[in-house]
Image (spheres, grey):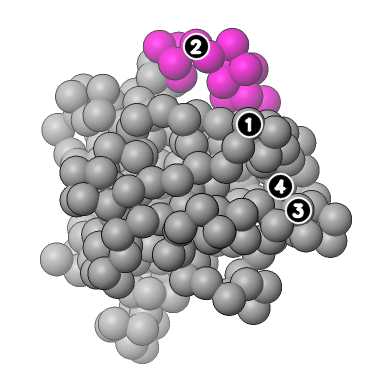
Amino acid sequence: MKILGLIGGISWVSTVDYYKLINTGINQKLGDLNFAECMIYSFSYGDIKKNVDAENWDNILEMITKASLSLQDGGAKAIVLCANTMHLIADRLQERLQIPVIHIATATAEAVQAKGIKKVGLIGTRFTMERDFFRDKLTERGIEVVIPEDDDREFLHYTIFEELGRNIFTDETRKRYIAIMNKLVTAGAEGIILGCTEIPMLVSDKDVDMPLFDTTAIHADAAVEFYLS
């Protein structure tokens, strides 16, 4: 077995789900009282958010590198960044480590490809939707990506930080998310990637009639697979 190093607190709300999903997944495979051997470095979300607002990715990279090195030095054999947006610096982070960073977009792209889907909708923060770090993993596999229109992207970005990341989930916001996803289906999407680790707490398969790709669950499954390899 391999010790996992989780970088959490981005936000703590979804870090809880990572811990639960990884432990549950390992126990399902190994049974008895076998669970994950892991370490968690949890940031204060505000320290990350102010750098995200300033788009100071170099400073974020330094912060996450320091945390990752402490986990690596403590015996971790892989790093799990418990947030989609933080994967914007994942490739640069990988260059600084001697252990692998389990990439959420790679795992998600493999899951989409396994379903035979050729065109997928992507929702998440503005960075996840608009930058290449997530989308490239899909296009490399011949999967077309469609994202919401400008005002919908702004709504998603705002509510992720100001509501979901604060553990606030409302019916009004849920209805708007569902409407946004339905627009993507109208634009040709065969399924929707929930590209923020808090979104699966707001919407689920019960809310929509389309395949949903829960990046938190997919990423946790990839971590379990690594752990047991």
As drawn, is 112 to the left or to the right of 154?
A: left
The structure residue drawn at horizontal position 63% and vertical position 31%, both measured from the top left corner, is 150
CB atoms at circles 4 and 1 under 8 Å apart? no
Residue marked by disc 1: 150
Asked which secondary structure carries label 2, the reply is loop
Question: Which residue bears the numbered disc 4?
Answer: 164
Q: Earlier in the sequence, mark 2 or mark 4?
A: 2
- Determine contact: label 3, label 1, CB under 8 Å: no
Stretch in magenta: 46-60
Residue where numbered disc 2 is placed: 56
Three-letter amino acid code of the residue under disc 4: Leu
Whether residues under marks 2 and 4 lie with C-beta atoms below 8 angstroms apart, the answer is no
The x, y position of residue 61, in whole percent, is: 38, 19
The amino acid at mark 2 is Asn
Q: Mark 2 touching mark 1, by CB under 8 A?
A: no
Q: Secondary structure at mark 4?
A: helix
Of the residues tagged 2 and 3, which is closer to the observer?
3
Instruction: Select label 3 or label 4 by which is in front.
Output: 3
Left or right: 133 with respect to 123? Answer: left
Compare residues 67 and 156 and report the one nearer the observer: 156
First in residue order: circle 2 vs circle 3: 2
Closer to the chain start, of discs 2 and 1, is 2
Residue 31 in the image: state x and y as whole percent.
33, 87
- Residue placed at 28% from the left, 52% from the top? 143
Residue 67 among magenta residues: no
Q: Of the residues tagged 4 and 1, which is closer to the observer?
A: 1
Quarter occupied by the N terminus: bottom left
Query: Which secondary structure is most common in the magenta stretch?
Result: helix
| Residue beneath disc 3 | 176
